[in-house]
């Protein structure tokens, strides 16, 4: 005979409902370390720069592969 196993993970004693949920959200948001305006602007610039770089790279790759496929299938424009 086997013994009944008990859970080793402690379950939180949480009230259910919309009001306690938003109270918990408010409490957690107070713990957040918010970035400064200067840091936010710098990170925004990094994100925009990476996006522009990816757009350029994808455009060049698309043009390259389109040209390569046209050369292989001989469906180029002009002749």
Image (cartoon, grey):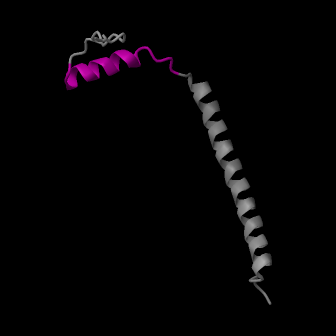
Residue at (33%, 21%) from the top-left corner?
25
**Which residues are drawn in magenta?**
16-34
Determine whether, in the image, residue 23 is placed left or right of residue 66: left
Q: Nearer the viewer, residue 21 or 44?
A: 21
In front of the other: 71 or 51: 71
Position of residue 34 measured from the top left corner of the image (x, y, whole percent): 51, 20
* Identity of the residue furthest to the bottom in this view: 79
Check residue 32 for magenta coloring.
Answer: yes
- Residue at (31% x, 18% y) in the render: 24
Image quarter of residue 74: bottom right
29 horizontally vs 55: left or right: left
The quadrant of the picture occupied by the C terminus is bottom right
Vertical comparison of 45 with 64: above or below: above
Q: Is residue 23 left or right of residue 59?
A: left
Dominant SS type (magenta):
helix
Q: Position of residue 5 (x, y in %)?
A: 31, 11
The quarter of the displayed image where residue 30 is located:
top left
Left/right of residue 13 with respect to residue 31 in the rendered view: left
The question of residue 71 being in magenta is answered with: no
The N terminus lies in quadrant: top left
Residue occupying image coordinates x 71% and y 48%: 53
Residue 42: x percent and y percent?
Answer: 64, 31
Count every numbered label the image shows and give the total: 0
């Amino acid at each position: 005979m086997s013994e009944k196993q008990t859970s080793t993970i402690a379950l939180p004693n949480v009230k259910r409902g919309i009001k306690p949920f938003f109270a918990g959200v408010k409490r957690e948001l107070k713990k957040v370390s918010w970035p400064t305006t200067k840091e936010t602007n710098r990170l925004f610039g990094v994100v925009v720069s990476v996006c522009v770089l990816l757009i350029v790279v994808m455009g060049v790759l698309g043009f390259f592969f389109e040209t390569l496929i046209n050369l292989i299938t001989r469906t180029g424009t002009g002749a």
